[in-house]
Image (cartoon, helix red, strand yellow):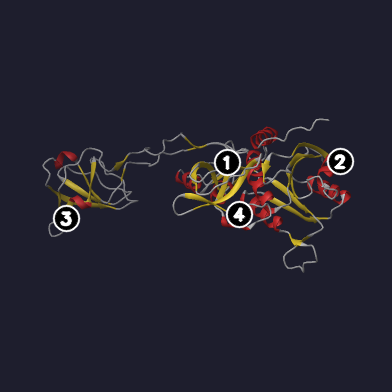
């Protein structure tokens, strides 16, 4: 039988995005608790912002017709701090006004205080500027008009979105239910920090990496811990994980070795629809579903066991899949071209993701050891170079850089 070619990274992402079933449930929570959550319905403003004409500067509210000469001396008959309502401005007078305060009726301009000379002994002010109507005035509804949509459904809420919602008085927001993700880790060699390492054992760094990444995406994490390297134990863990999860995420056991039981266990409990991606690091990536007694199956994503491979495949495939489950429309990370300050003369035939760091000259330095077990490269680096298959990189070339700040949140 002819061996099927491995999927490209783009083909794998397309398959995952097409398969994702968005979470239907939603809840309403206080706006101040909605950071990182995904908006379930578009939000509109019930008010104009600003609600009334107000001043952008500290200065004097005037009638521009009173200031045509360039050195108009006007009586200051009121003082208007922010949050206070002034009296109508009489002809030939000015109002001392402070940033954010409402423009009094009759005034049509504000002159900044640096262009004025106050006369405390008489209570007058000389306006040494010829203002134009509307100068330094924020008009009612200039930022947001009542009834306009301020946030679209599927928006992942950052601090600025919460501030915008608060600015129109939205005390609560409808958000998509958090994804429920069950995780477990296979490998008899795995130990937990704090335990004494037996000969041949290693500490389970992937448990901390994946839990942290999942929590950063706002997931509810069910951690089933380390599962023995047997088919029966792996099948039992899959059944336990499927009961209450939208996604089952594993690390290790998806390759082709005699002790790699995850793939056959998933095939026994459900199905595998994707396996092996033409990328480096991270070739052994599996996607499928695990059946459960009631309801739709749980999705399954099996990541490689090497920590860098696990980290990179999570960022490239699991992250967008989880965002799409939460109804986020735009899940592609932003990448941009930067100068390579290194040579990469022997590229792989697979799509490579190289750990790099932005240097002081605005170029990219390459971590010297690109091995899939070298976790220090992910701490040292500031992102990944997305290098196409068989693409030689010479010093000075422009390469596609994806910062971790676009991927690790």
Q: Position of residue 259 (x, y in %)?
A: 84, 50
Q: Is residue 43 left or right of residue 53?
A: right
Front residue of this view, candidates 83 and 293: 293
Residue found 81% across the figure and 43% down from its top: 263
Please identify, in this view, whether the residue under mark 4 or under mark 3 is nearer the observer.
4
Nearer-N-terminus badge (4/2):
2
Name the disc covering residue 118, or none. 3
Q: Position of residue 328 (x, y in %)?
A: 60, 38
Q: Which residue is mark 2?
A: 268
Nearer-N-terminus badge (2/3):
3
Q: Residue 20: which quarter of the image?
A: top right
Please identify, in this view, whether the residue under mark 1 or under mark 3 is nearer the observer.
1
Please identify, in this view, whether the residue under mark 4 or under mark 2 is nearer the observer.
4
Q: Residues within 10 Å of mark 2 (few under 14, many from 20)?
A: some
Q: Residues within 10 Å of mark 4 (few under 14, many from 20)?
A: many
Name the disc covering residue 378, or none. 4
Alpha carbon separation for disc pair 4 and 2: 35 Å
Nearer-N-terminus badge (4/3):
3
Q: Residue furthest top?
A: 2
Front residue of this view, candidates 125 and 161: 161
Q: Position of residue 218 (x, y in %)?
A: 63, 49
Name the disc covering residue 392, or none. 1
Nearer-N-terminus badge (1/3):
3
């Amino acid at each position: 039988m002819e061996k099927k070619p491995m999927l490209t990274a783009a083909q794998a992402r397309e398959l995952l995005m097409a398969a994702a079933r968005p979470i239907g449930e939603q809840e309403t929570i206080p706006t101040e608790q909605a950071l990182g959550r995904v908006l379930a319905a578009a939000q509109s403003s019930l008010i104009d912002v600003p609600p009334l004409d107000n001043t952008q500067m500290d200065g004097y509210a005037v009638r521009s017709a009173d200031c045509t000469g360039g050195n108009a001396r006007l009586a200051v008959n009121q003082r208007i701090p922010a949050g206070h309502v002034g009296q109508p401005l009489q002809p030939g007078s000015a109002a001392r006004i402070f940033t954010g305060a409402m423009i009094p009726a009759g005034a049509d301009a504000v002159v900044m205080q640096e262009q004025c000379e106050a006369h405390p002994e008489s209570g007058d002010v000389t306006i040494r500027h010829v203002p134009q109507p509307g100068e330094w005035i924020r008009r009612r509804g200039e930022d947001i008009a009542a009834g306009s949509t301020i946030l679209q459904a599927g928006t992942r809420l950052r601090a600025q979105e919460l501030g915008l919602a608060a600015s129109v008085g939205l005390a609560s927001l409808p958000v998509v239910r958090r994804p429920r993700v069950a995780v477990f880790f296979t490998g008899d060699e795995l130990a937990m920090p704090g335990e004494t390492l037996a000969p041949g054992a290693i500490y389970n760094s992937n448990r901390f990496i994946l839990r942290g990444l999942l929590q950063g995406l706002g997931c509810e994490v069910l951690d089933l811990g380390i599962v023995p390297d047997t088919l029966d134990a792996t099948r039992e863990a899959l059944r336990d994980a499927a009961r209450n999860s939208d996604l089952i995420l594993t690390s290790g056991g998806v390759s082709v070795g005699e002790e790699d039981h995850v793939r056959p266990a998933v095939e026994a409990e459900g199905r595998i629809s994707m396996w092996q991606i033409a990328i480096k690091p991270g070739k052994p990536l599996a996607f499928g579903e695990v059946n459960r007694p009631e309801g739709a199956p749980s999705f399954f994503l099996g990541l490689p066991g090497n920590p860098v491979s696990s980290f990179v495949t999570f960022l490239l495939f699991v992250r967008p899949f989880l965002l799409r489950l939460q109804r986020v429309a735009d899940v592609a990370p932003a990448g941009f071209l930067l100068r390579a300050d290194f040579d990469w003369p022997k590229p792989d035939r697979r799509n490579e993701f190289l750990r790099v760091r932005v240097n002081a000259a605005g170029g990219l330095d390459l971590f010297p050891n690109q091995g899939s077990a070298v976790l220090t490269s992910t701490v040292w680096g500031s992102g990944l170079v997305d290098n196409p298959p068989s693409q030689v990189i010479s010093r000075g070339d422009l390469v596609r850089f994806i910062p971790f700040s676009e991927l690790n949140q």
